[in-house]
Image (cartoon, rainbow, N blue to C red):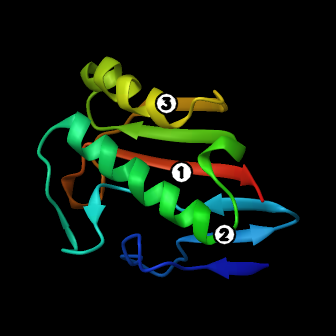
């Protein structure tokens, strides 16, 4: 198992890796909308936060030698399911290969984020 790290995505805010590679697959940790340059969530709306999440995931996957085009499965967490359509609009711009996906509403996310996404991708 290889740990993946890039400065182009936020540092882990707990005892975990940005991603790990195992058996030719990349497993990302969930990404929230933290801008890696400021260390803060800068957007207050779902579209802005989803865009930052996708940038973070893209950076982690690229550091692992993969890409969003090689995604097999995503798991998406929304703080409010009323944001589903707006989330999908941005998500669809990045995951054009349409990987398998689960999307659930949760009571609360770290740092009161509106969205969190994790990915399993081929190397």
Figure check: 117 above or below 12: above
In the rendered structure, the answer to whether residue 80 lies left or right of residue 5 reads left
N-term-proximal mark, 3 vs 1: 3
Q: CA distance from mark 3 to mark 1?
A: 11 Å
Residue picked out by circle 3: 103
In the rendered structure, the answer to whether residue 80 lies left or right of residue 24 reads left
Figure check: 52 above or below 39: above
Location of the N terminus (image quadrant): bottom right
Residue 15 is tagged as none
Q: Quadrant of residue 44?
A: top left
Residue 27 in view, yes or no:
yes
N-term-proximal mark, 3 vs 2: 2
- Badge 3 density bin: few <14, some 14–19, many ≥20, Cα 10 Å: some
Q: Quadrant of residue 45?
A: top left
Q: CA distance from mark 2 to mark 1?
A: 14 Å
Q: Secondary structure at mark 3?
A: strand
Residue 30 in view, yes or no:
no
- Badge 2 density bin: few <14, some 14–19, many ≥20, Cα 10 Å: many
The answer to whether the residues at label 3 and label 2 have Cβ atoms under 8 Å apart is no
Figure check: 117 above or below 7: above
Residue picked out by circle 1: 118
Q: CA distance from mark 3 to mark 2?
A: 24 Å
In the rendered structure, the answer to whether residue 70 lies left or right of residue 10 reads right
In the rendered structure, the answer to whether residue 96 lies left or right of residue 86 reads right
Residue found at x 60% / y 64%: 62
Q: Quadrant of residue 22?
A: bottom right
Residue found at x 32% / y 44%: 51
Q: Secondary structure at mark 1?
A: strand
Q: Secondary structure at mark 2?
A: loop
Residue picked out by circle 2: 64
């Amino acid at each position: 198992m290889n740990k993946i790290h890039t400065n182009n995505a936020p540092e882990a805010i707990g005892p975990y890796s940005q991603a790990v590679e195992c058996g030719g697959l990349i497993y990302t940790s969930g990404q929230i909308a933290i801008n890696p340059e400021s260390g803060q969530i800068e957007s207050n709306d779902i579209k802005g936060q989803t865009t930052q999440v996708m940038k973070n995931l893209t950076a982690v996957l690229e550091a692992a030698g993969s890409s969003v085009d090689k995604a097999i499965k995503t798991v998406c967490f929304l703080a409010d399911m009323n944001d589903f359509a707006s989330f999908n609009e941005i998500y669809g711009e990045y995951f054009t290969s349409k990987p398998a996906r689960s999307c659930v509403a949760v009571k609360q996310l770290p740092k009161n984020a509106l969205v969190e996404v994790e990915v399993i991708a081929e190397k």
